[in-house]
Amino acid sequence: MAGLSLSPAPPPEGSVTVAVMTSRSDMRKRVSAKMILRGSGCSQDASDEPVRSYLYVRKMTSWLGKKTKEALTPTTISASHTPTPSRPVSPLPASRNGKPVDRPGHLEVRILEGRGLTLPPDVAIPDAIAQAAKFGHQRKPSNRSQACWWLPYIVLEYDSNATLIEATGGQLTSPVWGSHSPFDVSRVSDLVLSVYLRTGPPPSSDRKEPPSAGDDILIARVDVIPNLDSSSETEQWYKAIMGQGEFHVRMSFKAQNEQLTVESFDLLALIGKGSFGKVMQVRKKDTGRIYAMKSIRKANIASRPGEITHILAERTVLALVHSPFIVPLKFSFQSADKLYLVMPFINGGELFHHLQQEGSFDQTRSRFYIAELLCALEHLHSFNVVYRDLKPENILLSYTGHLALCDFGLCKLNMSEDSKTDTFCGTPEYIAPELLLARGYTRSVDWWTLGTLLFEFLTGLPPFYDQDVNKMYQRILHDRLHFPENMSRDARHLIAALLDRDPAKRLGANGAEEIKRMPFFSKIDWKRLLAMKIPPPFKPRVGGLIDVSNFDSEFVTEAAVDSVVEDSNISETVQDRFVGFTYNPTNEALANDGGTYGSVLA
């Protein structure tokens, strides 16, 4: 059999030796034949399908937005003050995006028509589309958008919030839309039009949503910078920056500083639940935009040392960082008993859901995801923020197939390049060796988890996984890396460099640029990736913008209710800790003009 022989002796500390896994059966030997399904009181034979069994175990303990608690020791984070991040330490891309607006309000957008649209080179018109375009739709639809299902449709996005616009007439090369789309504005962002052509047959007569869009063809994209300094209406044609064509767009902005409560939203579906609260899909009543609302009971976090600090840190980071690969904060507000964080609803679901469905990803898809995550982590590090909990459950997939990092409850603020911290936290499968050795750790822990994640994408299992957590920790400290024979040399080299047990020698210790230069990423144009100009290799199958089929059915079958809290008895001292939690874009902008963000949550 090909590959290196395995030595029983552990490698020297600070190094990772590499052995080639010669077959899929070798991987199976590393996994226990019985995988206990936590919380279900039953077991499942995993001898034939270790990857799927492992993923099923993970599914049983996963929920959107849930923080992973410390595995061995309680947190040592001080709860005596609210952390605030320092200013970026490295230059960020020149962009207006992310700057809080002086006047929050509503952006009204109407995409009127297009002209000169063409398919990408070497892409043929799908048969169903060609037939419909030639003979017309023979059924009698209940509305015009169903009659024009075969024409290009638009996914319109502003600040990670998306809406779907169906054509109402025209031709393949010159469709007509005309739909009115309002967006909530809390910070400057590009308005992005992604134009798709369906590949499948028309929707059935009893189906309200359009057909699944996983295989649809991206034919053009337009980026528009809205004018938020004037309430006057603008109207003009914009050329595509990807593909061919022009688009007639009308826009206007109206300032509106609104005071939000939970009554400002319709509660649509429960999509996650944990010990501190729940996550619901909601619709904002005035604009109709769909969001994910995380509600957290104050009494629940007040009873746990450090949890208030975690929540306030999450709110601070989400409000101040801006990356296309990080879920932004749209609103935050509070009642006497609860905290509310409102973010765009990313309806492609957790990346974990897709990994569970497929077992593993091919190299092209894995490279694309890791590249976007690398950009997200680089952006956080530029703000001296360490993420510390990278895992598939904390990564969402957008309607168009891009990644969005979420759940910042375990992030660490004010971590400069040479700073160390010693709080033991994270998820066991992804914990770096330096955490286990309790010697303090730096930003390099994020690069260890990135390497672990790449290995899991390509194989379906983390590299040192064991059902027994203590054994898994020993494997993280001492075991060799084992690679399948079919893993490319470039992937092996990248993973081995990211999983160096010496954090000072680990790839990324000198910054993200040295990771980007690895041969594994030779096909990535980083400027185009950051501008989201590289089409994703996979587009999730989503029935519409409110579709929750990519979320755990255990939750979505429950009613979405903002439960009443009785007798929470929260002291005035604890309530004072939440002063400044409400997200006010104007105040955030003023804080950005100073040397620190200390006034944001003062």
Image (cartoon, rainbow, N blue to C red):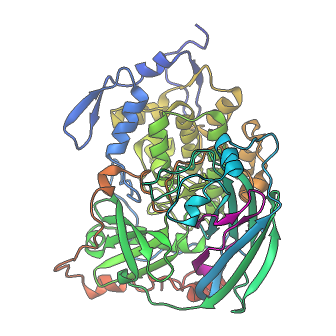
Between 352 and 12, the residue placed more toward the observer is 352
**Residue 488, horizontal then vertical, whole percent:** 68, 27
Q: Where does the magenta region start and end? A: 161-190
Compared to residue 268, the image places residue 503 above or below, namely above
Tell me the quarter of the picture where residue 556 sits.
bottom left
Q: Residue at x 59, y 44 (%)?
A: 200
Find the residue positioned furthest to the top.
1
Residue 335 place in picture, x, y as percent: 33, 84
Left or right of 222, for residue 578: left
Name the residue rendered at 80%, 78% in the picture: 236
Q: Is residue 510 visible?
A: no
Q: Residue at x 24, y 73 (%)?
A: 563
**Residue 194 colored in magenta in the image:** no
570 shown above or below 466? below
Q: Residue at x 36, y 44 (%)?
A: 59
Nearer to me, 264 or 21 = 264
Answer whether residue 438 is visible to the viewer in this image: yes
Furthest residue to the left? Answer: 567
x then y, percent, for residue 421: 50, 58
Which quadrant of the rendered structure holds the N terminus? top right
Q: Quadrant of residue 239?
A: bottom right
